[in-house]
Image (cartoon, rainbow, N blue to C red):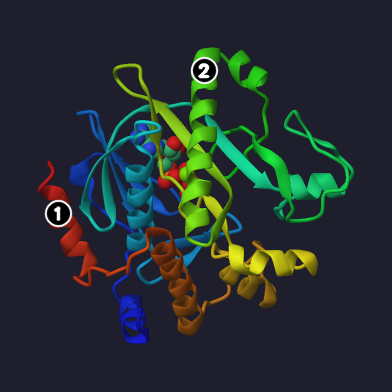
Amino acid sequence: MDIDTLRKGLALTIESTALDFLGDKYEGKVRDNYSRKDGRRFIIVTDRISAFDRVLGTLPWKGQVLNSLATFWFEETKHIVPNHLLSVPDPNAMECIECTPLPVEMIVRAYLTGVSSTSILTTYTKGEREFCGHKLPEGLKAHQALPAPILTPTTKAPHGEHDENVSREQIIATGKVTAKQFDEAAQYAMALFAHGQKVCAARGLILVDTKYEFGIGKDGRILLIDEIHTPDSSRYWFTKSYGERFAQDKTPESFDKEYLRRWLSEHGWKGDGAIPTIPDDVKIESARRYIEACETVRGAAFVPNQEPPAARLEQNLRAKI
Ligand SMILES: Nc1ncnc2c1ncn2[C@@H]1O[C@H](COP(=O)(O)OP(=O)(O)OP(=O)(O)O)[C@@H](O)[C@H]1O
Ligand SMILES: [Mg+2]
């Protein structure tokens, strides 16, 4: 995307929504969710950006980019698992089937990486050779591929708390998920990930790890819900530079939030205290990377809708009620 369009986007971001006619609102860090009594849920992907679990402001076109990526992947994987997507009424919105979410996030990992204190890389470096019940071989290096992708479920922590790693048995013991449901969702997660890796490989990308959420629909079927394979839920690396950087013990080049995270930490911010003001040029560069990511995955140019978003959203969504 050209720099003028990127710059123009700075004044067209969606920071919050007030679409009360849609239903009960639940505000996540990035998305505004409206659930209705008629079995539908509208998910509005705003332009908010979060890092280190805090909302930092907005990025031009980010919501449209993420919505377009999730739409692509829902289409691309619906032969593997049915999902909640009904329609895309607006470039920033999805109309979905309201489900009862399974209280577990299905995380699939294919590489020894991560930065948080509970990440697989951190615990491996400390000497642990078992992660969420998976035995890990000796001698793995940072950012190395695991012998095979592994499933590491976590509980869905209440707002503001950190998710915790749990085993299949612990989750089933809560009584909130049956063994059959867990195993079906686990199988889906592994199949989705394998397909995602295959599609990415053809585009010069590595799907490193990701998170899936599942829900139970009215008819008792398990559906894929939430979002899929966006840079907010997944880590992607570039295949081209991976080998060389790995050989030099360097962190792989990624197109997730790494750029902004690095800028923030270079400016002394690691998640606590006042958020530094992000200059427009940094926002633009960050947005450019999100767009490049989306275009690489989709294999098509990203063309943003440049209408004033608040009025457009309201009009498009009212038409659905
Ligand atoms: N089709 C659906 N039916 C019911 N709940 C859904 C559906 N799709 C997503 N959800 C749930 O809606 C919630 C959406 O929240 P959202 O992702 O916006 O914020 P969050 O998960 O609380 O925080 P974060 O911003 O860190 O992701 C999640 O708990 C998700 O499981
Ligand atoms: Mg979420």
Q: Is mark 2 on a helix, strand or loop?
A: loop
Res 240 quadrant in image: bottom right
Q: Quadrant of the C terminus?
A: top left
- Give the vertical position of 45 relative to 37 (above or below): below
The kind of residue on which mark 2 rests is Lys
Q: Quadrant of the N terminus?
A: bottom left
Q: At 20% from the left edge and 70% from the top edge, which residue is drawn?
A: 308
Which residue is disc 1 drawn over? Answer: 316
Res 137 quadrant in image: top right
Q: What element carries label 1?
A: helix
Q: Can residue 58 be seen in this view?
A: no
> Does 245 sit left or right of 16 as displayed?
right
Between 245 and 54, the residue placed more toward the observer is: 245
- Give the vertical position of 205 relative to 60 (above or below): above
Q: Where is residue 139 in the image (x, y as percent from the top left)?
A: 88, 48
Residue furthest front as drawn: 202
Which residue is disc 2 drawn over? Answer: 176
> Does 170 sit left or right of 60 as displayed?
right
Q: At 48% from the left edge and 78% from the top edge, which residue is drawn?
A: 285
Task: Tell me which label, 1 or 2, sits earlier in the chain.
Answer: 2
Q: Position of residue 86 (x, y in %)?
A: 23, 39
- Give the vertical position of 134 relative to 316 (above or below): above
